Amino acid sequence: MSKYEIKVEKAGANANVVVSGVIDEDADFKPYDLSGATNIDLHLGNIKSINSCGIREWIKWIGTAGAAKVQYHECPKIIVDQINMVQGFLPSQGSVISFYVPYYNDDSGSEKNVLFKYGQEFTENGVKAPEAVTDESGAPMEMDVVEAKYFKFIKK
Amino acid sequence: MARKAGLSIRYKILLLMTTLPLVILAVYLFVAVGVFENDKVAYVFESSSSVAKTMASQTTTDLESSLTSAKPALQEFLSYERFATISKGLFSADGPIQWIAAVREREAGDFKELDVLERNKGTFQIEWRDVAGTSAMLTELSEKNRLVIVPFRDDRVILGEKIVVPATETTPEKTTLFLIMARVPNLVQVYQTPGQTENFLVDQTGRVLFGPAGTVGTNVQDRVKLPFLQVNDAQTKQGTDEVTNSAGEPLLASYSVTNFGRLFAVSLVPKREALKAVDTLIRKSLIFFAVLICVTVIVSLLAASNLTSALTDLYQATRKVAEGRFDIRVNISNRDEVGSLADSFNAMAAEVSRLMAETAEKARMEGELKTAQTVQETLFPAPNAVLQGLRVAGFYEPASECGGDWWHYCEINGKVYVWIGDATGHGAPAALITSAAKSAATIIERLDVSPSKALELLNRSVFEVSRGRIMMTFFLGCYDPQKRTFTYSNASHEAPFLISKADQPPKKKDLVPLNEVNSPRLGQARDTQFEEVTIELKEGDRILLYTDGIPDIHNPESQSWGEREFIKGILSSNKDYPSVDNAVQTLVDQFQDYRKGAPLIDDITFFMIQVEAT
C-alpha cells in the first residue's frame, strides 16, 4: 500500500489536487504533471509528514505548474513550516488560502488545530487570531507555535 | 566434530524391518495354530465319534442277527425242554450259529447242562471245555441276563441269553441260560482295520472283545485309562474324551455304546497323529518365515544402504561446511524426504555463502564508513570556543556513521563567521556533500566575502557536486565585533532564534527568528542569488542555530520530542541567561533524558553564540 495518495481532477483550465499521506523519497509526482492548468487548487489537509527528500520532489513537481495561479488549502503545520523555511516550496505566484494553527492547553494536554482562512483570520496585512480558543472542557488554549516564525509567510 | 558412536541407521532399519514382521508373524502363527488345533481336534472328535457310532451300530446288528437266527431253537427248547426238529433245521444251511447249549442253575449253585445242539457233532464238548472260567461266565450271565464272550481270539463269539419263563398254575418259574456259539467275521474285520485309529469293542471292565491284532482278551485300561467306562448312566450313549496312555502320550478317544449289552465301541487316535497337519502347518510356516526374513533382510539392506549413503553424503557435506567450505553441494537424486533435505541443504549452503559474502562486503563497507566517519570528524570544530568576544558552544551527533549536518565557525579578518547546514537525507551520500561544502568553505574563508556571496560560491560548489540530486539548507552568519552587528544569509535553513538578555527569563514571544531573508537551498539551481540582512546585537545577546533533527528525537516508545518541547527546552536552558556553554549542555541533558538511548531519526546539530562583554 502506497504511503501517499494524489488525486488530480482537471476541468478545463482548472485543476483540483488532493495530496495525502507521507511525502518522502518514495513519492513519485511524475504521473501528476500540473502543466496546462492556469488555476490550481491543492488540498493538503491530510498530509501526515514530509521530509527533505520529499521537499525536493515537491518543488520539482510544483515547478510543472509554470505560471499557473497556485493556491494551497488547509495547510497543516508541517506544510506551513516548509513554506516558511524552504524557498520555492510555495511558488512565487502561489498563495495560501487556509492553513491550520495548532493550539494546546499545557495543563490538560489537549490539542486542537484551528483553520485560519484568508480574509477571515488572516490577510496580507497580518493575522487576526480568534480572541479565545478553548478545548472541549472550555479551558483556554494557547497558540502552539512561535508566531513570528509561523506566520512569516503571510507577509511575503 | 566426530560421528557419534551407536547403532547406525542402517542396522536400526534392518532391526526394525526384521523384528516387526517376525513378531507379527509369530503372533499370527500362535493364534492360527491355536485356532487350527482346536478346529482339528473338533474335526477328529466328530469323525471318530461317527466311526465309533457306526461300529457300535454294526456290532449291535451283527450280534442281534446271530441271536435272532437262534431264537426259533430257543423257543422250541423253552416249550419242550429240548432242541428238536425246528432247532436242527438251523444247520440245514450256512449260518453263523455253530452250537447252542441250554443250562440251568441248580439250587446248589452249580449249573446243569440240559441240552446241546451242534452244527458239527462234538464241537461243543471241545470248545466249551477250552473256554476259561465257564462257571464264572455262567454266574455273570445269570446276573446280567445277556453276555458276549470272545473266547478264542478269532471270529467265534459266545452269546449268553438268560430267559425266564414265569410260573403258571401248573408249572413253576423256569430260568434257562442259553449259550450260543456264532461266527462274526465281518465284525472282527471292522475292529481289525489297520490305520492310525485303533478301534475296540470292550465291555465295562475294559476287556477287549474285538480290536487290533494282539489286543483281544487284554484289558484296554492297562494301556489307556478310559474314564467313561465307569459311567453307569444308561442315557449316555456316546461321547469323546482326551485321555493319556501308559506312555504319557495324549490320545483322542471317542466311544459309542452298543444296544447289545453294555459294550463300548471305542476309537483311539494319538493326538500327535491327529494334529500332524498342525505340525506340518508350523513347519511350513517356519520355512516361509525364514524365507520372508531373508527377503526382508536383503530388501532392508538395499533400502537402508540407499538411505544411509545419502545421509552419509549429507553428513560429509555438513562436516565440510563446519570447516568453513560453504561452496560444498551434495548431489542426491532421491525424490523423497532425504532428497528434499539435500535440496534444502544446498539452498542453505548457497544462502550461507551469499550471506558470508554480504557480511564480508558489509564489513568492508562498515570499515570504509568508519574511515569516512573519522575523516568527517575532522570537518567539525571544537565544540567550545571564544572568538573576538563571541562565545561559541555546540553539539553534534550523527544518526549513522556519517551525517549530513555540518556546522563550523571561523575568524576572518577580525570577524567571526558561523556556518550551519543540513544536506538532504543523512548517511554517506549526505556526508559527501558536507565534505564538499567544507572544502568550499575552506577556500571561501580566504576570500573575505559577505555571507550572501559566500553562499553563492558554496551553492555553485554543491550544485556541481550533486547535480541537483542532493541539496543542502544552509545558514551563514557573520559577527562584526567592532560594530556588534550580525549579517546573515539563509538558504532555506531553519531560522535561528535570537534571544536578547533581559531582566525576566525569556518567554516564547522573546524568541526572535532570524528569517528576514530566505533563499533557495544550496544545489537547487546553479546561479541562485542570495540575500542578506544585518541586525545589531547587544551584549549578552545569544543566537541558537540548529538543524531540524532535534524535534525529531524519539524515545524508546517511538514518541517524538516535538517542537513544543524543543521550544520549552530552549527557554528553560536559557532561563537565567547562563553561559552558552551551560545552556547547550542543559539542552543536551534534556533531550538525552527524553531519548533514553533510543536511535536517532536524523542528525542532531545545534550551537549557540553569545556576545560577551568587551
Image (cartoon, coloured by chain):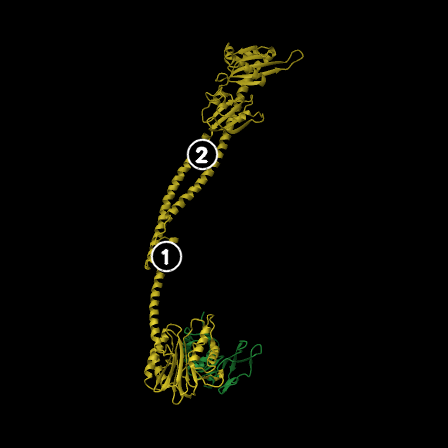
Chain A palette colour: green
Q: Position of residue B184 (x, y in %)?
A: 50, 18
* Label whose residue precedes the other's in the sequence (1 or 2): 2
Chain B palette colour: yellow
Q: Position of residue B584 (x, y in %)?
A: 43, 79
Measuring 39% from the left and 39% from the top, which residue is drawn there?
B290
Among all residues in the image, which is located at the extreme bottom?
A: B483
B415 or B519, nearer to the observer: B415
Q: Please name the residue that numbered disc 2 is placed on.
A: B278
Q: With respect to residue B567, does B368 lie above or below?
A: above
Quadrant into which the N terminus of chain B falls: bottom left
Say few, some or many: other residues with alpha carbon within 10 Å of mark 1 (under 14 / 14 to 19 / 20 or more). Answer: some
On the picture, is B491 further left or further right than A146? left
- Pointer 2 chain: B
Residue B434, by quadrant, is: bottom left
Q: Tell me, for residue B343, which label it has, or none.
A: 1
Q: Position of residue B35 (x, y in %)?
A: 48, 36
Measured Cα–Cα span from mark 1 to mark 2: 54 Å
Q: Position of residue B179 (x, y in %)?
A: 55, 14
Q: Label 2 is placed on what type of residue?
A: Val
Residue A69, by quadrant, is: bottom left
